[in-house]
Image (cartoon, grey):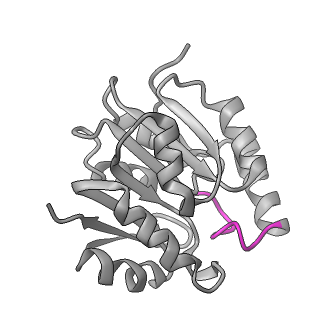
Amino acid sequence: MKTKQKIKGNSLKESAVFLKNAIFKPKEIAYVFPSSRALIRSIAIRSGLSEAKKIIELGPGTGGTTKGILSEMREDAKLCAVEINKNFVEFIKKNIPDERLSVCHDGAQNLAEIIKQQGWQHADVIISGIPFSTLPKGMGEEIMQSIYENIRPSGLFVAYQFRDRVGKLATPVFGEPSSYLEIKNLPPMRIYVWQKSE
């Protein structure tokens, strides 16, 4: 079984699945197009994956960023991808055969239980592509508190977003982030990196 993923462009099949769900489930999908190779690479690099062993990805979509994370991860690390869209869950399970990956059909507000099911006490890194700007009122705050409580001290929270709603939610909890603009994506994305205090 394959245990290492290379960062590649999105396949036609992957793009078609993504677009179909973006049209029919717009509140679950932040963007019409999946992440570019440049964005995926930038996210993976800024997430400190060379040191992380327990990684959570929130909102993996069709798995483009998931493959990028796997390509940068240690061989002894584990990745849990948390996705609310059942179609995406099934697509990732079928198309990314990596023993280090588990896919969880659940909501990000349930991180404590998800991490417990993985046999972990915490995550070293949480990477998020979920559309915070489209979440129901109060859910963003609930998810952010869940993220904060389930990252180890000095661990990282990395979010890539088109709008700045995630910054307004995370900064009061984590403090000021580092941020980077990736223009080689449609639309251009800002990557935010927060480190939990020790």
Which residue shows up at 82% across the image and 68% down it? 23
Residue 94 image offset from top left, x and y in percent? 71, 30
Residue extending furthest toward the top: 1
Which residue shows up at 49% across the image and 79% down it? 141
The quadrant holding residue 51 is top left
Q: Give the overall secondary structure of the magenta segment.
A: loop
Residue 155 image offset from top left, x and y in percent? 25, 54
Q: Nearer the viewer, residue 66 or 176?
A: 176
Residue extending furthest toward the left: 198
Q: How many marks?
A: 0
Residue 35 image offset from top left, x and y in percent? 55, 57
Q: Which residues are magenta?
A: 25-35
Q: Is residue 12 above or below residue 76?
A: below
Which residue shows up at 36% across the image and 39% down it? 54
The quadrant holding residue 178 is bottom left
Residue 120 image offset from top left, x and y in percent? 39, 38
Is-magenta flag for residue 53?
no
The quadrant holding residue 130 is bottom right
Which residue shows up at 71% across the image and 51% down it? 15
Query: Is 163 positioned to the left or the right of 154 in the image?
Result: right
Look at the image and tell me whether residue 162 can be seen.
no
Q: Nearer the viewer, residue 94 or 126?
A: 126
Residue extending furthest toward the right: 24
Query: Is 66 positioned to the left or the right of 33 in the image?
Result: left
Q: Is residue 1 above or below residue 183?
A: above
Query: Is 144 positioned to the left or the right of 180 in the image?
Result: right
**Image quadrant where one finds the C terminus:** bottom left
Q: Is residue 17 above or below residue 71?
A: below
Is-magenta flag for residue 30?
yes
Q: Is residue 166 above or below residue 66?
A: below
